Amino acid sequence: MTKSFFRGLTLVIFMVLSAAIAQAAPYAALVMDARTGEVLHARNADTRLHPASLTKMMTLYIVFAEIKAGRMSLDQMVTISRNAAAEPPSKLGVSAGSRVSVRDLIRAAAVKSANDAATALGEAVSGSEAEFTRYMTRTARAMGMNNTQFRNAHGLTQSGHYSTARDMALMGQRLFYDHPEYYNLFSRTQTTAAGRTLNHTNRRFLNAYEGADGIKTGYTNAAGFNLVASARRGQERIIVSMFGGTSTAQRNARVAELMNMGFNRAPSTAMVVALPRIHLDGGHPAATRETGLVTVAVRPAARGAPVAVSMARDYDNEAQAAAIAAAIAAATVGTPISPGPMFVRPPDSETVIMTPPVRRTDLGTSFALASVEEEQVAPAPVRTTAPDASGEYAVQVGAFRTRDQAERLLIQTALVDLDSFSGALRSISPATVQGVSMFQARFVGMSLGSAQKACARLQALQSDCAVISPPS
C-alpha cells in the first residue's frame, strides 16, 4: 500500500514538473499562405528558439536534394555508426554495424522522427554529423533562414542549435515546392522501415484536421511541443509553424485555430510565387539564383542513358526505372529522317516524333513551381484554355509508374511554359510496355505545328518530350 502510494506520488510529481518545464518553453507562431509566402499571422516569429525535431525537415530536404543530384540513391545501404545507434529515443532502434537503406532511414526520420535515422543520414551525406550540420546551416542561409543554426541532424537540445517560427515555416514551404515527389511521406500515418512498423508522430492532427497532409512534429523539454503543419482546402494551402506548446493536445488545438485563421484570411485564388533556386553541392557554400516562370535552366551534366530513362522515372525504385526505360527503348523501332526529327512507331501504332535525346531537368527543383491549386488534379483531362482548332496531336512529357507522378509533371510543365500549351488538355493514360504498367503524361488536342513548337521549347529548357500523332 505504502509503496503504491509513493510510486503514484512520484509519478504525479514527475508529470507536474514535466508540464511546468513545457509551459516554460516560449511560444511563437507564424501562419503563411504557402502559395505566395504571405504572412497572415505572426507572434514572436523571429525569436530564436529550440526547434526540436523540426530540424529533421532540413535533414530530409538535403537528402532529397542529394538523391536528385545523383550523389545518393534510395537503395543505397548505410552502415549505422556507434554515434547514430547511441542516439536517444525516438529512434528506429537498429544496432551499430547494421546496414539500412536510405529509403528506410528516410521513412523512419520523416514518420517516426527517429533520431538515429536522422544522424545516419547526415553521416551518409557528409561523412560526419559535424560536417553535415555545416551543410545544413549553409542551406538554411541560402533559403533565407537567417535566424537558424544547426548543431545536429535530429534536433535534440544543444547549445547553438536554434531556429524560429518564421524560418521553420519557410522550411516547410521549401519541402513542399522543391521536393513534391517526396511530400507524401509526411502525410503517411504509418509506414514500414527495416522490418518495423512505424506510426506517425503527427497522426492525431493528420486524422483530425480536414485537409492536413504534413509536415513535422518536435518535442523536447526546452522546446515544448512544436509543429509545422500544412493543410489544403480547395485552391488554398496554409502552413502553420508553432513553437512552445504545453502538450500534444494543446498544440494540436492551437495549430487548428491558426489553420482556421489562415484559411479565413487567405484569398481563394492566388498566383504561386516562385522561390529562389538553390544550388547544393554538399561541399561548398550553397548559392541562390532567382528564377522566374520561364528562364533558361542551368544545363545539367550530360548523361549517357537514352531519353527513355527520364520518361520512365520512378522515384521509389531507381533500378526498376532503368529496367522500364530499357523496355520502352526495346519496344520502340524507327528510321531516322534527315534533316529533321526521328519518327518511331511504338506497339500502339501511334507515331512518335522524338526530339534529340536530352536530359529532363527536374522541374520541381529547378523552378520550385509545383502548383498548389492543381497539385491533385482529377484523372480526366483538364483544358488549359480554348481548344485547338486542329488538335489531333499530343506532346508526351513522360511515363511513370504512378498517376500522381504523371499528374505532377504535367502541372509543373504547364507552369513552366504556359504559352506553349495554351489550348491543350492534360491527359493521363495507362499503358503497358512488355508487361509493365505505366501512366503516360501528355498534352493533347494540339496541332502538329503547336506540338512541335512546344516540344522545341521544352528541349531548350533541357526537358525530354515526344510529339504523338493521331493513331493510324
Image (cartoon, helix red, strand yellow):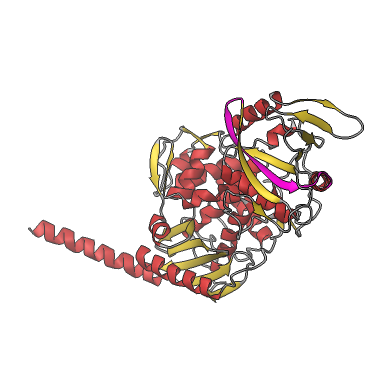
Q: Main secondary structure of the magenta part?
A: strand
In this view, 219 is above or below 340: below
Q: Which residue is depicted at the point 55% across and 33% down?
A: 75
In this view, 287 is above or below 299: below
Residue toward you, 344 or 147: 344
Q: Is residue 330 magenta?
A: no
In this view, 277 is above or below 101: below
Is residue 312 left or right of 49 when viewed as pictured? right
Q: Could you tell me residue 107's position as x and y percent?
A: 48, 44
Q: Is residue 438 magenta?
A: yes
Q: Could you tell me residue 72's position as x and y percent?
A: 62, 38
Is residue 157 visible in this depiction of the protein? no
Is residue 464 visible in this depiction of the protein? yes
Quarter of the image where the C terminus is located? top right
Q: Could you tell me residue 9's position as x and y percent?
A: 18, 63
Number of numbered discs on residues: 0
Q: Which residue is depicted at the point 81% across and 48% down?
A: 450
Q: Residue furthest right?
A: 339
Is residue 122 left or right of 361 when viewed as pictured? left
Residue toward you, 188 or 160: 188
Rendering quarter of residue 441: top right
Residue toward you, 23 or 348: 348
What segment is highlighted magenta in the picture? 434-449
Is residue 383 left or right of 235 when viewed as pictured? right
Q: Could you tell me residue 209's position as x and y percent?
A: 42, 63
Residue toward you, 333 or 74: 333
Quarter of the image where the N terminus is located? bottom left
Is residue 251 left or right of 29 when viewed as pictured? left
